[in-house]
Structures are given as structure tokens and as C-alpha cells.
Amino acid sequence: MFHSQLCWSLLLVSIAAAAEPQPKARPLTMADILAGSKPADWRPLDPENTLYLELATGRVVIELAPAFAPHHVANVKALAREHYFDGLAVIRLQDNYVVQWADPNGDKPELARKIQTAKRTLPAEFERSLDPKLPFTRLPDGDIYAPEVGFSGNFPVARDPKSGKMWLIHCYGMVGAGRDTGRDTGGGTELYAVIGHSPRHLDRNVTLLGRVVQGMELLSALPRGTGALGFYEKADQRVPLKAVRLAADVPAAERTQLELFRTDTLAFQELVESRRNRREEWFQAQAGHIEICNVPLPVRAAPPAAR
Amino acid sequence: MFHSQLCWSLLLVSIAAAAEPQPKARPLTMADILAGSKPADWRPLDPENTLYLELATGRVVIELAPAFAPHHVANVKALAREHYFDGLAVIRLQDNYVVQWADPNGDKPELARKIQTAKRTLPAEFERSLDPKLPFTRLPDGDIYAPEVGFSGNFPVARDPKSGKMWLIHCYGMVGAGRDTGRDTGGGTELYAVIGHSPRHLDRNVTLLGRVVQGMELLSALPRGTGALGFYEKADQRVPLKAVRLAADVPAAERTQLELFRTDTLAFQELVESRRNRREEWFQAQAGHIEICNVPLPVRAAPPAAR
């Protein structure tokens, strides 16, 4: 009797469901996901690993990647702390490639900026050993260049289980340490950011050490250099760096308070899906796939409570 | 005897080869390939399918793609020939995405530029039937978004043998016809060019109709718009179009005489290989792969004889 009552009840529920279907949940857009995100879906920038590039037009905010380039990050921090970069300049901008800042007199020993405690060059940190304990949110659609790609924190990362290596990927806005021909000739005294289509052939050829998280347009819209490789041909075309500072060294009230959308959450998985198949009304066709450098990494002003 | 003499001779040759090895052919770089290219490895632009965007800062040269968007190309030519675009403006630039030019008063019927003989809108040409007779140089390393990718003429193209369709790809510099929400609301009165990482989710969502082959930096370095989607918020931020002309309508002496590196040649296959594995001394690691939007499509001033 009890059994048959239960069955009857279930049948009624089932009939009701068939007669009045629940409105089907609309697939979420990125705007929906961000609007519905919880405070725990975001994380603040660590001032000890955040670099400010101060230009006359404003501030470029760079998150450093000590998990991938510990020695280069430490050296760039040391260079910033001894004010090495202040008064140096953007010296190169090659369209659809990179913008680079460095000492314009770097090749003239008598005029070149002196280094105090930091190092001029460092052994390359093109890749690191694959540590399964490092966070890694793998993307589902593969990659042309690497066996596995995904995000570790807010950095695009490739992994090769066969070689046991992992490395940062040259997506738009990634920051690396320029070098000469020799493998170990970089170190962070000259830095560049990607301003075009991801130049993936640079992966594992340069030490990447961070990513621009705000102010990218202050670099990407600068005039293109007309010399070879986009170098500015005249001194007055260069764009001076007012200063380069570690956020931790800037008074708290003068810091740019940002939060990054975490990549180790269910909300991020939803965001990836919302970009593999765009649900905004405008889209007529769904790509069904996403390539790593097309995944957006949202940034927002930190809510006052989080500051 | 003969046999032993032959063997001895071969042995001598072999010893000589070991002692004085022939210089091993160095793998070619792109610079080598271009330097060694023959006139037949290049082709001129067709003035009937070349559009000039005249800005105060110079000329942007666009090759049109009638094989992929015949009606849109014809309409853009008709618009140019009735001087529709002259005095309109760049109205939008969204960092790492697109720059767009159109009628700033397009949404005000009483102020909007009138159209004479061209069409305001056209049915979408997002893709076309796969015609095996159209040139197609397939790339060897696959693609995240499409079953096959390669080049048809100097355009990046995707193909899907299953659906029997092919379509143009949103690489850097590709030009498309902006549209409203409806599928058939484009037509060429507003055009955009890709200025960042290839937004492949736009493939098959917009009619692509050409590619910038020279002057891209005149568009990509313009200030980023600060409004939603990168629209310029103030009228004086817009960049006026002095004129938009078909090359065929410009006196021959005033044309920009360019040649494009053909993609249906052995030399192009070598160029692709030279970019899959970079042989320049600077490179420490070879990517071993190439993604379609990273393949360079060289352009040069036409030698006087070819003009």
C-alpha cells in the first residue's frame, strides 16, 4: 500500500512535469557568470608580485609569475627596488608582435644604466619541471603547439607529461625578459609584452615572467617603430618610463586595487564553456571550441570590503 | 676484379667523404627563402579587387576576396565608387579585438549618409560551398576550430569536408562587414579589421571580405575607444576617412604597387616549414608546429619591371 502510494505520487509528479515543463535554463553568458559570481570566485593581486609601470599616460599593472620564473621575478623586483628602470623607455614596438622597454643606451657601456645589487643576466627559465601540485585547469579543446594547455592561477600554461615540463604561453599581454642570441643572456633588464596574435614560436625561447592585467592599451596603442624589428629610430620617439615600482613599495592608498577571476573554480569552468559556445543573441554560429589565448581572464576593481 | 675495384673506389669515395664532408645544407630561414624567390613566386594585386582606405596618416591597402564574399565585395566596390565612405570615420577601436569604420550618424536616419546605387544590407556570406577547384594550400598541424585550414590565394581559409563548406578565418588584419543582431543585417557599409589575437569565435558569424596587406599600423595604433565595445565617446576622437577608393579607379601612377608572396608554390611550402621550425640563430627551441594565423604572408613593393 505504501509502495503503491509512493509510485502514484511519483507518477503524478512525472505527469505534472510533462504537462508544465520547467523553463529550460538558458545557457549562461560571460556577463551572467560575472554578475552571479561570489566573492570567493575572485582573488586579490599580491602586492609582492605586482609591478607598476608608470607612464605619463597612466599605470600598467603586471602580475608576476614566481612559480614559473622565480629567479627572473626576484631579479626584476630587485631592479625595480633599486630604481633601475626609472627614466628608461619603451624603445621598440613591432606591429602584431611585441612592445619592449629597456635602457636605450644598453649597448653603450659608458652610458648604460648601472646595476647596484641586481643581476645583469640569469640562466634561462624557459620551462620548469611539471609539478602536479601546481594549480592547473586544463582546457578541453587541445592546442596546436603543446600536449596540454590550461591556466595556473591567471597564467596560460602548457604542459608536456612526456618531457615532464611545463611553461608559460605567449598570449596577448604576457610579459617576458628580452635576451640576446645566447640562451642565458636575459635577466629582466629589458622586458617586452605581447601586443598581437600569440607568437607561440617564442614559447620556450624566452623567459616569460608575468602578464599585464590592466593598462595594456597604454602599451599597445603606442606608435609602431619604423626601424628594423620595430625599434624607434629617433630618441624623441621613445616613450619614457616615469618609474617601475613593486606594488608592495607603493603606499597602500596609491595602489591599484584589483581582483582577478580565479581559474580553479566551477565559475571559471562555466566561463570557459560560455566562450566555447557564445550564447549572446548576436551569435549565429557556435565555435564549439576555444583556443587558450582566446579565453578572457576578467579583472575588476576590488570591492571596498576586499581592500 | 671489376667488382673489387668498384668496391675499392667506393671505399675511397667514402673515405674522402668522411674526411671532407660536404657542407650540410643549412635549413632555410624565411629571409633565405625570400632572397632566393623567383618572380613567379609573387603575384601583383588586382586593382579591381584592391581597396584603398585613405587616412590623414597614409593609405591602408586591402585585398578583397570575391571568391568568398562575392556580393559583399561587389557592394563595397559600389559603395566606394559612389564615394559613400568619404568623410565617414573610424568610430571604434577595442583593444586586442577590432577597429571599425562606419557612418557616425548611421543610427540617425535624418543625418545618415545616403546610399545611391549600392545596397544597405545583403544576405550573409559567412561561408560558401567547398569548391575543390579553388586553390587551397593546407597546413600540416591542424586547427582548434576547424577540420582543415590553409590558404586560398592570400587568405586564411577553413574547410569542413563533412558539411561541404569553406570560410575565411579571423586572423590579424582580416576585414569584415559589421552587422546588427540579425544574420542578414550586414552589407559592407560598416567594416572592421582584426587588430589583436585572432577572434576565431567570430568565424561564420560575420562576412569576411578582405585582408589588409599594407598600412595595418595606421589602424592598429589608433587610440583605444573608452566607451562600451571600444566606441569613441566623443566626436573629435573619431578618425576621419579622407576617401575610400578602388585601386582601379585611381590613376596608375598613384597606385601602391605591391606584390604578394604566392601560397600555391614550393617556395611557400618552404616558408611554412621555415616558420614551423625557426632556424635563425636566436632560436633555442623549435615549435615543430604552426597555427594558421602565425603564418606570415610576405608583401613587397613590386619591382619596376612588374608594374
Image: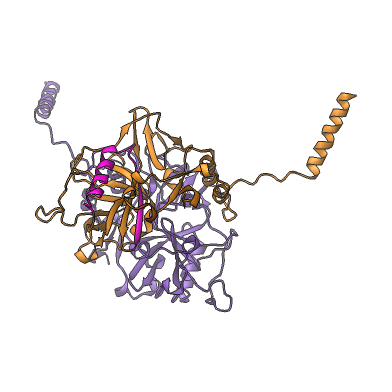
Chain colours: A purple, B orange
Q: Position of residue A51 (x, y in %)?
A: 40, 67
Relative to A271, is A98 on the left or the right?
Answer: right
Q: Is residue A44 above or below residue B290?
A: below
Asked if the magenta segment contains residue B81, the reply would be yes
Front-lying residue, B173 or B95: B173
Front-lying residue, A11 or B6: B6
* Segment colored magenta: B57-85
Q: Position of residue A221 (x, y in %)?
A: 35, 63
| Quarter of the figure with the N terminus of chain A | top left
Relative to B244, is A8 on the left or the right?
Answer: left
Q: Position of residue A148 (x, y in %)?
A: 45, 43
Front-lying residue, A88 or A24: A88
Q: Position of residue A158 (x, y in %)?
A: 46, 48
Asked if the magenta segment contains residue A256, the reply would be no
Note whether residue A161 is visible: no
Q: Is residue B280 above or below residue A102?
A: above
Relative to B106, is B58 on the left or the right?
Answer: right
Note whether residue A72 is visible: yes
Residue that appears at 34% across and 36% down: B67
